[in-house]
Image: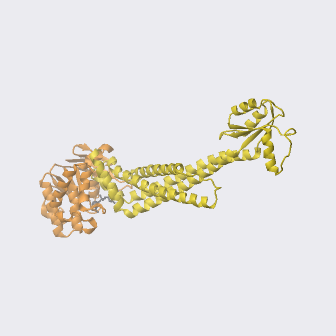
Amino acid sequence: MILTKNLTKIYSNGVVALDHISLTIKKGEFAFLVGPSGAGKTTFLNLLIRRELPTSGLLAVNQKNLATLRKSEVPLHRRSIGGVFQDYKLLPQKTVYENISFALEVIETRPKEIKERVFSVLELVCLLNKANVFPSELSGGEQQRVSLARAIVNRPLLLLADEPTGNLDPDTSWGIMDLLKEINKRGTTVVMATHNREIVDQLRKRVIALEHGKLVRDAPKGGYTLET
Amino acid sequence: MKLRTFPYFLREAFRSLFRNSLISLASIAIITIALLLFGLFFLFIANLQHLGKLAWDQVEIRVFLEQEYHTPQIVGQQLAALPGVKSVKFIPKEEGVVFLEQILGEKNLFSAEENPLPDCYRLSLTEAAEPAEIARRAAALSGVEEVVYGQAFTRFLQLVLRLGLVVGVVLLCLTVLAVLYLVINTIQLTVFARRQEIEIMKLVGATNAFVRWPFLLEGLMLGLGGAVLASVLLTKGYNILLQQLSSYSRFIPLLSGIGINRTLILALTAMGLCFGGLGSLFSVKRYL
Ligand SMILES: Nc1ncnc2c1ncn2[C@@H]1O[C@H](COP(=O)(O)OP(=O)(O)OP(=O)(O)O)[C@@H](O)[C@H]1O
Ligand SMILES: [Mg+2]
């Protein structure tokens, strides 16, 4: 699913955000991406969704080399990926329903199918009663769930979640985690960047730890730190 | 791009117009003002040009024949054949006397036998005529005694008309550019307000063409809105002006009627649509 070899990202201001990362993530895996602030987690996710280009090294997603992916192929590549962003990225002028259906309109799904799918994910994230509400009228956890719903509505092969539990209380966080586990169980590969020690330690999934852009640990059923 | 997606584009464009109603209204207002400026200028220049042409129509060349010249018809045919001559009017010396008597306010100036006036032709000119050239060639015809026309005035009028045309066209082009600039900048603001939307559309896999369409439609609608408002204001305002002027005096022959309105509305609509559409495409490009 994801294959990197000596993947390096140096921003134009000279910051080395990723430094010779080599790893593979298989289809159907669930991986946590951990590390202190500035370690390069978001950068890694941004490379996967091709918001950024690698500086050097190999990066392949779905057997496609992202370094050489043509611009016209980027939309297609992104349609196979769902993204949950640190800042939700919901559109304030659109209702919850529209924020989600939007992801399907963009890939020109049939209107009838759009309706069915949006309602089915809304049900999954327990927001059916908020379909016609605007994001500003939602709590942080609800916005996060809308963002998650939008990410999975087109049934992506790969789900990238950047701190989906940031700023959320423990109960809501666990609610999100249950959703992610459920989505993963249905076959979607999940990569989640997080600072949430409790969640990582309890779930015992694969842990990929970055520090200053370097891969410092890659443990199959790891904890948030080496000791845990 | 599938055909069934177009209703979605239209819906999106309308939705965005109404949900960002403040920005939409402000944009339409600015586009209207820009187009109004153009329209006023257009009317001004069109009328100046029109008045100049009316003045030109008054210009005439008088060709006096030699006394006792017996075949004035031949001269008349030759004069009519000169390039730039619109029409030729023969004024026999008997009529000349009548004119002169009118001007001088006297009666029975000369008896028919001792009338010293020559027969005369009056030439009226086409727009492209060169009065000096016509006068020169008329004077060279046999039977012609003298050619008279308001040389200084004609030359002045000619200069004003030609210069006026060039200056008018240049200035009009400049206003068009100014309108383009204003409209593009305005639309850029509406797009700027929605740059996040573009980013998210792209993140969920929208193609550039897909992102452009709703914005293009929205730009066209804003442009059209501005054009309609400007057209209504200008044609109504202009008609009121014409009415007011005609009630004060009949001697300001401004352009009037459907013709000028139609040209104006066409120009405004074309500009509104083109610039609105272009402005959108141009503005969206920066965020793609
Ligand atoms: N667009 C950018 N241009 C330049 N430098 C950047 C850019 N984005 C990130 N960086 C730098 O790259 C490094 C890694 O940033 P990144 O956002 O990947 O960290 P992170 O692990 O996601 O941190 P956090 O946990 O705080 O979200 C940081 O030093 C950051 O300043
Ligand atoms: Mg980050």
Q: Is residue B36 left or right of residue B198?
A: right
> Any idea which chain is the orange one in this picture?
A
Tell me which corner region of the image, top left, top right, bottom left or bottom right, holds residue A60.
top left
Q: Nearer the viewer, residue B162 or A135?
A: B162
**Residue B137 location, quadrant:** top right
State the colouring used for the structure image. Answer: by chain
Residue A8 position in % (x across, y down):
30, 50
Chain B display color = yellow
Q: Is residue B276 above or below residue B79?
A: below
Residue at point 17%, 67% (across, down): A172
Closer to the camera, B161 or B14? B161
Position of residue B288 in the picture relative to residue A165 (left or right) = right
Q: Quadrant of residue B221?
A: bottom left
At x 27% / y 65%, what residue is drawn?
A134
Q: Position of residue B151 (x, y in %)?
A: 76, 44
What residue sits 16% from the left and 69% below the top?
Answer: A171
Q: Nearer the viewer, residue B284 or A204?
A: B284
Q: Is residue B25 left or right of residue B115?
A: left
| Residue B140 shows in this picture | yes
* Residue B194 percent location from the top left of the image: 36, 58
